Amino acid sequence: MQIHPPQIRRAGTEVEWRVTVEGLPGPPALWFRVDSRWTSLLTDLSDPALAALLIPAMAAGTDTRVAGPLSERLWFQLSGCCQPLLQRLLRGLHPIRIDARQLRDSGPRPAGVATGFTGGIDSWCVIADHHLAAAPQGFKLTHLVFNHVGSHGAGGERLFRERAQRLAPAAERIGLPLVLVASNLADFYDERLSYLHTHALRHAAVALLLQGGIGRYLSASTYPHDRAALTPASGLTCDEPLLLPLLGSGRLELFSAGGAYTRVQKILRLADIPETWQTLDVCIHADRAGNCSQCEKCLRTLATIEIAGLAQRYAAVFDLARYRRRGRLRYFAIVRHSRNDFCTDIAALARQRRFAWPWRARLYGWLRWPLTRLEDAVEALGIRRPLWLRALRALRRRQPKCIFIR
């Protein structure tokens, strides 16, 4: 694969950063677009392209030549210790050689500090710690970033713009500029390289794109740092504290932020921030903006705030009636028996608050217990979809139904 030197050009009200790519399945060029007012944030280095295309190149087993200028530190890390780490985490990757002829010392670190903003629990927690609360000047947020690198699924560009419109007023109210970054990066990743298992490098590519004005990028941690793991089952989520420091350059430092909290602790922390009552968005559905109040992440959040007695605060962003009607009892049953970290934390909160589980949830929990244990075992083994998903769905169809659960 060859990555040609980057070109930066204006396209209407936007500015496009583009590199031509040869020898790799996918589009003929990788591009990122931002509003023209953020032109000063864009880098003239090839760093974003190498970070974005490293995993697809390793999946194809093709050596890479970078024709444009590249940060010496990033080249050293991605040529060396980063590749064995990715091979351990993602099956089917091969070591590759990276040839770069224009290595540069990236120069001094810019003063900007950014984090990704999705309206979710993790990103709001970073804002709480590094903007709403007192933070050292070098770690206090100056920008929020919302990007399109694959997290919007089938909704694509339409859903990206729709979600951005929902986030922009919240960013304005808390006093931080929101940088929107569109890209065709996801078109280089096939079904084997899902967003769930490759998002760390996708978002790092966006951070490196903005290193013209951003010197620190705080990536919102999904898991507490004491649960960091280096296994295929963890994907690129549990291992972020290990991986992210390897993706920086001389101008940009990347950190995993928020790892001092469990998910339950984050939710309880955010419940005291009124802005989240109107803007919290945790849903995993990729066909619309807002919360469905039925998916796993919605149910996880709703169960936590109900047990804590805070559900009414979030009535504007969740359909509480749908939750109580269609998912509440089933999810309570899962929480009572699952060994999943999120569920055990919620169960611990219930014990602490002396929460009275509904008797129907208790009954259904015992009926569902064997399936819950199997799901935990499959997750621990790191068996990938769709095989394990089809197996679990088949078991659910054979599972005794509980007439008390709707």
Image (cartoon, grey):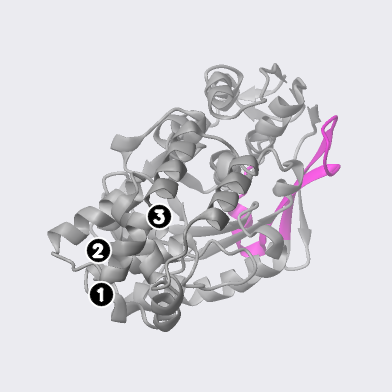
Q: Position of residue 314 (x, y in %)?
A: 35, 78
Magenta segment range?
15-43
The residue wearing badge 2 is 268
Residue 198 shown left or right of residue 297 in the figure: right
The amino acid type found where label 1 is placed reads: Leu
Residue 310: numbered disc:
1
CB within 8 Å, label 1 to label 2: yes
Quadrant the N terminus occupies: top right
Residue 358 shown left or right of residue 240 in the figure: left
Mark found first going from the N terminus, 1 or 2: 2
Mark found first going from the N terminus, 1 or 3: 1
The amino acid type found where label 2 is placed reads: Leu
Up-down relation of residue 32 to residue 124 (above or below):
above
Q: CA distance from mark 2 to mark 3?
A: 29 Å
Judging depth in this view, the residue of 87 and 171 nearest the camera is: 87
Mark found first going from the N terminus, 2 or 3: 2
Q: Is residue 371 magenta?
A: no
Judging depth in this view, the residue of 339 and 145 nearest the camera is: 339
**Disc number lying in front (1 or 2):** 1
Q: Position of residue 406 (x, y in %)?
A: 45, 75
Is residue 336 something that shows in the picture?
Answer: yes
Residue 368: numbered disc:
3
Judging depth in this view, the residue of 31 and 39 nearest the camera is: 31
Label 2 residue SS: helix
Which residue shows up at 58% across the image and 21% down it? 83
